[in-house]
């Protein structure tokens, strides 16, 4: 009986005895975890500090989305998950607007035959062209001889209209949205050929239209004599 009591006391005081008589430490014994308590406290403090820092850095990412769209310009751009628009700009799903470097606009038209009066030309007095030399972007309509601006920007226009064997004075105007902007004259001198020429820079909005109109006189255009040209200088 005393043997068993001493064994019980040893278990209570010193821990559990193993099969070979080795003493096993009781993990639930009071004070058994007292030694590493300081290291656990340090780790908990470090984790709490890191968790405190994380939320403060996240709003900076969201703040970028609240700003105005970023506009990039260049010749070589790669934009993922984007959709191009009609004016040459690309808007991605992130709200980034990228202007394509390939959005170039230019045209040059001429007449390859004599300008014979027709019912339409007598009514509209539009100077029609029948051959396109350059039409980058396809914004010049040959049938109506009207150029339509694809986007807002500064455009350059020039024309050279020749009267052939015609003693009447002619006046040619460049029309923007139906209103004359500039004009040129060719006199009534007795010469074989005389030209009315002019050029201008225009601020145009998208869908603005430009064409040439014969304001005065009678026009007959010789082969490649009368020309009408324009191009986009830079977009706005």
Image (cartoon, rainbow, N blue to C red):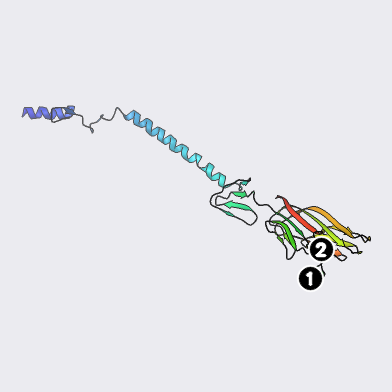
Query: Dot 2, crowdedness within 10 Å: few (<14), some or many (≥20)?
Result: many
Left or right: residue 226 versus residue 7 is right
In the rendered structure, find residue 135 and report the number of the disc placed on it: none
Q: Earlier in the sequence, mark 2 or mark 1?
A: 1
Instruction: Decide which of 193, 210 is in the foreground and name it.
Output: 193
Residue ranking furthest to the left:
1
Instruction: Decide which of 66, 40 is in the foreground and name it.
Output: 66
The residue pinned by badge 2 equals: 213
Name the quadrant containing residue 191: bottom right
Name the quadrant containing residue 125: bottom right
Q: Are marks 2 and 1 in contact (CB under 8 Å)?
A: no
Q: x, y percentage for residue 29?
A: 22, 31
Position of residue 143 relative to residue 98, above or below, is: below
Q: x, y percentage for residue 52?
A: 45, 37
Residue ranking furthest to the bottom:
119
Secondary structure under the numbered disc 1 in the rendered image:
helix
Left or right: residue 30 versus residue 89 is left
Left or right: residue 143 versus residue 65 is right
The residue pinned by badge 1 equals: 120
Residue at 78% across, 58% down: 228
Secondary structure under the numbered disc 2 in the rendered image:
strand
Instruction: Decide which of 110, 173 is in the foreground and name it.
Output: 110
Q: x, y percentage for residue 211?
A: 77, 61
Q: Quadrant of the N terminus?
A: top left
Cα distance, mark 2 to mark 1? 12 Å
Position of residue 86 relative to residue 60, above or below, is: below
Residue at 63% across, 52% down: 89
């Amino acid at each position: 009986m005393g043997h068993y009591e001493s064994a019980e006391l040893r278990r209570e005081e010193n821990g559990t005895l193993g099969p070979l008589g080795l003493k096993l430490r009781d993990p639930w014994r009071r004070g058994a975890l007292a030694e590493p308590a300081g290291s656990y406290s340090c780790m908990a403090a470090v984790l709490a500090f890191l968790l405190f820092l994380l939320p403060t850095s996240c709003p900076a990412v969201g703040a970028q989305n609240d700003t105005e769209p970023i506009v990039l310009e260049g010749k070589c751009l790669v934009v993922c998950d984007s959709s191009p628009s009609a004016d040459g700009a690309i808007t991605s799903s992130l709200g980034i607007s990228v202007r394509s470097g390939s959005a170039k606009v230019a045209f040059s038209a001429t007449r390859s035959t004599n300008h014979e009066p027709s019912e339409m030309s007598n009514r509209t007095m539009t100077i029609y062209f029948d051959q396109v030399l350059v039409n980058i972007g396809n914004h010049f309509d040959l049938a109506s001889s009207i150029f339509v601006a694809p986007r807002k920007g500064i455009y350059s226009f020039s024309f050279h209209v020749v009267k052939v064997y015609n003693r009447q004075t002619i006046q040619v105007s460049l029309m923007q949205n139906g209103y004359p902007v500039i004009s040129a004259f060719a006199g009534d001198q007795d010469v074989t050929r005389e030209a009315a020429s002019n050029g201008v820079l225009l601020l145009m909005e998208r869908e603005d239209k430009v064409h040439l109109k014969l304001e005065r006189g009678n026009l007959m255009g010789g082969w490649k004599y009368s020309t009408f040209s324009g191009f986009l200088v830079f977009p706005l």
